[in-house]
Amino acid sequence: MSHNAAHDMFEADAASRALGIELIEAAEGSAVTRMLVTEQMVNGHDIAHGGYVFLLADTTFALACNSHGPVTVAAGADITFVAPARAGDVLIAHAEEKTRYGRSGIYDVTVKRDGEVIAEFRGRSRVINR
């Protein structure tokens, strides 16, 4: 796995690492992460709180859009929850760049458990000047 700007960003991402999110790979315009759903992530319906699933997808999106180098942030995102996740499930998120135009980009993230789709996320990115 080659080291790029996404790896540097992840190493500084205390929020994602505190939740046990692991960076599996990050390449030009793509990224893969993994997260174990813990008991602390389960809501009153005994399923993973959607905010945690969103956070996993959002982290993976951020890694993919920052893989190019310039500092890139989310301009917006949408998620569709397809199936519930439960405590003990290992979720794998895969982000893929769909297009970049000017300082903007569109990325899709699929979150799966054992090959079953849990959620589909679409993120819109914007390169910012630091």
Image: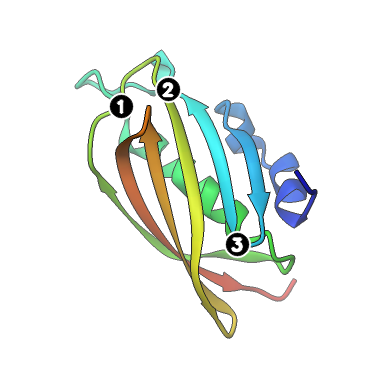
Q: Residues within 10 Å of mark 2 (few under 14, many from 20)?
A: many
The front one of 91 and 116 is 116
Residue drawn at x 56%, y 72% is 126
Residue drawn at x 47%, y 35% is 92
Indicate which disc residue 37 carries: 2
| Label 2 – label 3 distance at C-alpha | 26 Å
Residue 65 place in picture, x, y as percent:
59, 62
Given contact means CB atoms under 8 Å apart, are the residues at marks 2 and 3 in contact?
Answer: no
The answer to whether 127 appears left or right of 41 in the picture is: right
Mark 1: which amino acid?
Ala
User: Residue at the left extreme?
Assistant: 45
Camera-side mark, 1 or 3:
3
Q: Residues within 10 Å of mark 1 (few under 14, many from 20)?
A: many
Find numbered disc 3 in the image and state the secondary structure of the residue it sits on: loop
Find numbered disc 1 in the image and state the secondary structure of the residue it sits on: loop
Indicate which disc residue 29 carries: 3
Instruction: Give residue 38's quadrant in the image.
Output: top left
